[in-house]
Every structure is written in C-alpha cells, then in structure tokens.
Image (cartoon, rainbow, N blue to C red):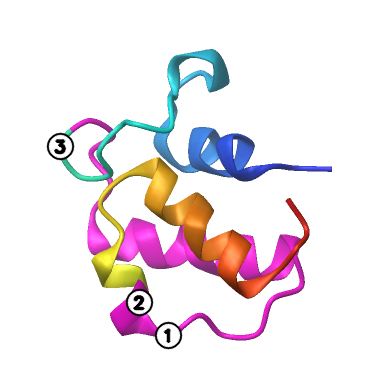
Amino acid sequence: MKNLIDIISFYTGFATHAITYDMRIVEDLGIDSITMYEIIGEIEATFEIEDIPAEVVREAKTVRDVEKLLRKYTLAI
C-alpha cells in the first residue's frame, strides 16, 4: 500500500528516503499548486477520502501538515 511519502516521491521525483516530514512543500520540494492538487487527489483515491477542502489544502506548508490533513480526514495512516 502506498503511503504519503511514496505519493510525494512519485509527483516530485525525490527519492523516498530523501523526503522528511519537516520539508516545506514549495521551498524544499518545489511543489506548485497544480501538483499539490494532483497529490491531494492521489491521497484521496489511495486512502478513500472524500474531497479535502481546497482552503484546507492551501494551509499546508510542510509534509507534516499534509500528514495532519490525512489524520484529520481518515484513520488510514
């Protein structure tokens, strides 16, 4: 089963071992808003989550913030 780091790795090209939870989404990983929504779509499909609100996604600044979103919207992690 894919996890959050696997999904981020796929969309960014970073090796899974190089991604940490303290990495910043834009500054460290270079994820733009379009890629972020692709990642969120993959997360929703993988973890069977209903739509995560866009305004909540925009507030995520680090990988840890995205993990918190997952924890809030599912217990799958």
Q: Which residue is at a point 25% across and 67% down the rendered structure image? A: 59
* Quadrant housing the N terminus: top right
- Magenta segment range? 28-56
Pick whichever, 11 or 69, lies toward us: 69
Circle 3: element type:
loop
Circle 2: element type:
helix
Identify the residue position indicated by label 1 in the image: 53
Q: CA distance from mark 3 to mark 1?
A: 23 Å
Circle 1: element type:
loop
Identify the residue position indicated by label 2 in the image: 56
- Residue 61 in picture, x, y percent from top left: 25, 52
- Residue 75 in picture, x, y percent from top left: 75, 63
- Kindly indicate the quadrant of the structure image that contains residue 19: top left
Q: Residues within 10 Å of mark 1 (few under 14, many from 20)?
A: few
Amino acid carrying label 3: it is Glu
Q: Which mark is residue 73?
A: none
Q: Is residue 5 left or right of residue 23?
A: right
Amino acid carrying label 1: it is Pro
Identify the residue position indicated by label 3 in the image: 27
- Residue 52 in picture, x, y percent from top left: 50, 80
Based on the picture, tell me whether residue 41 belongs to the magenta stretch: yes
Q: Which residue is at a point 76% across and 72% down the rendered structure image? A: 48
Q: Is residue 37 left or right of residue 50?
A: left
Amino acid carrying label 2: it is Val
Q: CA distance from mark 2 to mark 1?
A: 5 Å
Which of the two labelled residues, at mark 3 and mark 2, occupies the earlier sequence position? Answer: 3
Q: Which residue is at a point 34% across and 31% down the rendered structure image? A: 22
